Image (spheres, grey):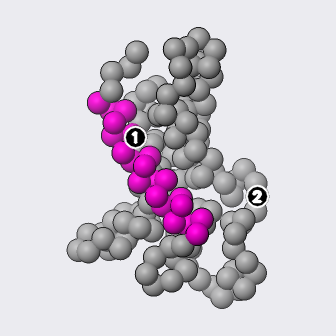
Amino acid sequence: MALLLDLANIVGGFLLAAVLLRLVPRVGDDLGRLADRAAPYAWIVGLVALAAGGYYLIVHLVSGPRVFHFEVVGVGVGLALLWRRLTGRAEPHAGRSERRAGLPEHVGLPGARAERPGGPTGVGLLLAVFGLIAIVVGIQGLFTPDG
C-alpha cells in the first residue's frame, strides 16, 4: 500500500507539474506529449492517491506514531486530480472571459491552464509547484523504510 501511495504521488505530481515541465528546454515537448497521453487516466491516479493517502492518514491518526507528510501530500494530489469529478464544476479561478476565449487546458486540472506563453500563473502555478513537491515526496517515500 505504501508503494501505491509513493507511485501515486510521483505520477500525480507529474500530471500536476506538467505545465511547468513543458517549459524545460529540449525535453519539455516530450514530457508534454507524455502528460497528454496520461491525462485521461488522471482520475485513476487521483483515486489511488486519495485512497492510499486517506488510509495512512486515518491509521496514523488513530494508532500513531504521527502523521507523515507522505499521506498529506497524497490526499492533496488526489483532491487536485479529482477536483472536477468531486465538485462537478470547472476551475474556481477561471473567469467567464477566460473560458470563452478557448484557452488550452492541461489535463482538465483546476488552475492548470497555460494562460500566457511564459507559463501558468496563479492557482495553476501553485498546483504545478505542488506537483513538483509531490514528485520529490514520492521519490523520498520509495527510499524511506516503512515502519
Q: Kindly identify the residue that appears in the image at 58 percent across and 39 percent down.
A: 75
Above or below residue 145? Residue 110 is below
The C terminus, quarter of image? top left
Above or below residue 96? Residue 19 is above
Q: Kindly identify the residue that appears in the image at 43 percent across and 27 percent down.
A: 2
Point out the frontmost of discs 1 and 2.
1
Q: Where residue 129 appears, x then y in whole percent?
A: 46, 58
Q: Main SS type for the magenta part?
A: helix
Q: Which residue is mark 1?
A: 137
Q: Where residue 43 appears, x then y in whole percent?
A: 58, 51
Q: Quadrant of residue 25?
A: bottom left
- Name the kind of residue labelled 1 in the image: Val
Find the magenta span and give its range: 122-143
Left or right: 16 in relation to 83: left
Crowding at mark 1 (Cα within 10 Å: few <14, some 14-19, many 20+): many
**Which mark, residue 43?**
none
Q: Which residue is mark 2?
A: 88
Q: Residue furthest bottom?
A: 101
Q: Can the viewer see residue 140?
A: yes
Crowding at mark 2 (Cα within 10 Å: few <14, some 14-19, many 20+): few
Q: Kindly identify the residue that appears in the image at 40 percent across and 40 percent down.
A: 137
Q: Quadrant of residue 146?
A: top left
Q: Examine the structure image and report whether residue 37 is included in the region drawn in magenta.
A: no
- Name the kind of residue labelled 2 in the image: Gly
Callout 2: helix, strand or loop?
loop
Q: Quadrant of residue 88?
A: bottom right
Q: Can the viewer see residue 11?
A: no
Q: Where residue 94 appears, x then y in whole percent?
A: 69, 73
